[in-house]
Image: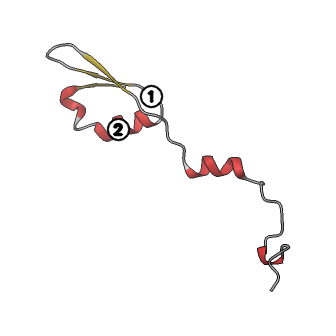
Amino acid sequence: MKLSTRSLMRDFPKAKAAARKGQAVEIIDGNTGEKFLLTAKPTRTFGELAARAKGVYAGPRNLSTREGFSA
């Protein structure tokens, strides 16, 4: 994604979302021609993290029936 410094404030939410998805955002200064690269560490959603843990616990759904929890 390419942006100018003038449009950065207007399109910052889009740029931030693109950077979080792992895309590099190039910001170009129109006056000097300098280029800046905005990157961010991609964030994972709870669903992506929970998918890895699916099926880890295979015991009874009622935890009170497990050993050591009897009343």
- Give the left or right position of residue 51, taking residue 35 as reference: right
Label 2 neighbour load within 10 Å: few <14, some 14-19, many 20+? few
Q: Total of numbered circles in the picture?
A: 2
Question: Do the numbered discs 2 and 1 sit on residues whose CB atoms are within 8 Å?
Answer: no
- The answer to whether residue 63 is above or below residue 15 is below
- The answer to whether residue 64 is above or below residue 34 is below
Element under label 2? helix
Label whose residue precedes the other's in the sequence (2 or 1):
2
Residue at the top extreme of this rendering? 33
Residue at the right extreme of this rendering? 67
| Disc 2 residue type (three-letter) | Lys
Label 1 neighbour load within 10 Å: few <14, some 14-19, many 20+? some
- The answer to whether residue 36 is above or below residue 44 is above
Quarter occupied by the N terminus: top left
| Disc 1 residue type (three-letter) | Gln
Q: Quadrant of residue 27?
A: top left
Q: Residue at x 65, y 52 (%)?
A: 50
Residue 13 image point, x, y percent:
32, 41
- Give the left or right position of residue 54, taking residue 58 as reference: left
- Give the left or right position of residue 9, taking residue 43 as reference: left
Residue 37 image point, x, y percent:
34, 22
Q: Quadrant of residue 64?
A: bottom right
Instruction: Report the residue marked by disc 1.
Output: 23
Quarter occupied by the C terminus: bottom right
Distance of mark 2 from mark 1, alpha carbons?
11 Å
Instruction: Tell me, for residue 14, which label it has, or none.
Output: 2
- Give the left or right position of residue 56, taking residue 29 as reference: right
Residue 63 image point, x, y percent:
77, 73
Element under label 1? loop
Closest to the observer, 53 or 47:
53
